[in-house]
Amino acid sequence: MHYSHAVRGLYSNNISTLTENAFAGLESLEGLDLHNNQISTLTENAFAGLESLEWLGLHNNQIRTLTENAFAGLESLEWLTLHNNQISTLTANAFAGLKSLKELWLYDNQISTLTENAFAGLESLYSLLLQRNQISTLTENAFTGLESLQDLWLYDNQISTLTANAFAGLESLRRLWLYDNQISTLTANAFAGLESLRRLYLENNQISTLTDNAFAGLESLKVLWLQRNQISTLAANAFAGLESLKDLYLQDNNITTIDQGAFSVFASSLGKLDIRRNNLQVYRESTFEELKYITELYSDLFRLCCVVGEIEVCEPTDAFASCTDLLKREILRILMIVIGLSSFIGNLIVIISRRINKENRSTVDSILLTNLAASDLLMAIYLLIIAGADIHYRGRYAKVASEWKNSFLCSFSGAISTLSGQCSVSTLMLMSINRAINIVYPFSTKRLKRTKCKIIIGIAWLVWLCISFLPLVANKSHVAIPYFGENYYGKQSVCLALPLTRHRLPGWEYATAIFIAFNGLGFFVIAASYLTIFLSVKRSAITANRRQRREEEIKMAVKLGFIVFTDFCCWFPIIVMGICSEMEWWRIPDDIYVWAATFIIPINSSVNPYLYTIIYMCKSERRP
């Protein structure tokens, strides 16, 4: 409320006492600002003679008690601010005479008790702010006389129990804030008399049980917040009386059971239901099927989206799966099997052939290529696990989605997929750096030796093994790292933790650091290495005595370059999409996300062995 004239500002002085008739002669004054003084007591008739006053600011003082008739004579007052004082008790008739008052701010005081008739005479009051006090109990008739009240702020107090008829007399109340209290029980008829209430905020309390008829009398309620409580069961009559409810928030409780008929009372009105981050185990599908008008459903169970059918928003979504199959696209099933088998066979041939070939198996290039094949072999195993799970769950996936995504096999496959990708990138980095050093400094004594190469590769495998499998064991009792959530790899049916979606799931920073930051750095190093090779070849004058050796190094660099290039083509789009997603520049369509995860990333593990080793072997056999 703003007043442009007839306002007296006496704030931020050292006023400690207001004597009787202190403002005599100011009959036309409309606003009086006394905040940020040292006033401790309001004497009787302190504001006598201010019959035109509409706004009175007394916040940020040291007022401890409001005596009876302290505001006598302020019949035109509409806005009274008393927040940030030291008021501990509101006595009966403390606001007597304020028949025109519309807003009363009493938050951030030390009020512990609301006595009967404390607000008597405030028949025009519209908004009452009592948050952040020390109120522990709401006695019957505490709000008598507030028949016009529409907003009541009681959050962040110490209220533990709501007794029957605690809000009697508030027939016009439309919004009630009770969150951040200590309420443990909602007794029957706790909200009786609130027939006009539209919004009820009860989140972040200690409510464990919703007794029958706890919400009786709330036939006009539209939105109910009950998240972050300790509710374990939704009984059949838990929401009796909420016939008009449209939005219900129940996330972050410990709900394990939903009885048949728990949602029946608002089956024809509920449009939004949020039951995420619970532990739902016992329920009947018919409980959700009867919600005919629901448009938004948020849960932890993909199966429920199949139960309610096509609606505007249903989460969790799964871009890869359908209600019947783990992989909903037939082409993806075929590609996953083909790429998986091709990669498995090709990389296995590479590893075996290099172990058999005694001449080449101990060279640095052979060690690096063998490790690249080993990491690509892990990707093949991942693909075959997912393809096998799709075949196993074919036609019934929705019913076992939670079982699969929470299984060890799903988490294990996600971990080896991460291990495969990161070891591949690390190996390619080392290959590129080694090749650049050999070409730019052909006679250097600091070339990468076999022993040093094995040590570096071993350390890389050990580091990525720990990083990849850490989320897998993070929810074990002896490790207990809540950062990763309960199921880091099981967010999607294909068990990947790629940071390409708009959702900020637990551990998303971890995934971003791995797949975007490290891989981005890796391919920058690879690009810099090959740029160095190109510039060195172009600018240097090749002498006769080192021409042959340098040409051999360049040929090897070209061969390895094909492998690097294909890996770059696979990973660079992922890095770009990840950056765009994290910066919220682009919402990646589901189809692109699916193809990126199931085709673009794995394809290089299948192509690598055929690009170099197998082709090289075939060429060797054709030599005279």
Image: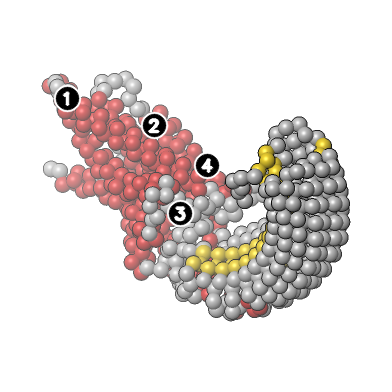
User: Can residue 362 be seen?
Assistant: no
Label 1 belongs to which residue? 539
Is residue 529 among what the camera can see?
yes
Q: Amino acid at mark 2?
A: Cys
Q: Residue at x 29, y 32 (%)?
A: 529
Tell me the number on the disc at residue 502: 3
Query: How far across and how far down the image is residue 128, in percent?
Result: 72, 56
N-term mark: 2 or 3 = 2
Q: Nearer the viewer, mark 2 or mark 3?
A: 3
Disc tally is 4
Q: Provide residue 519's location: percent of width, then percent of height.
A: 39, 41
Marks 1/4: CA–CA distance:
43 Å
- For label 4, the residue is 466
Asked whether the beta carbons under mark 2 and mark 3 sit within 8 Å of each other, the answer is: no
Q: Nearer the viewer, residue 371 or 409?
A: 409
Mark 2 vs mark 3, CA separation in Å: 40 Å
The first of marks 1 and 4 along the sequence is 4
> Mark 3 or 1, which is nearer the eye?
3
Tell me the number on the disc at residue 453.
2
- List x then y, in percent, for residue 373: 36, 46
Quarter holding residue 203: bottom right
- Amino acid type, residue under disc 3 in the picture: Arg
Label 3 crowd (10 A; few <14 / some 14-19 / many >=20): few
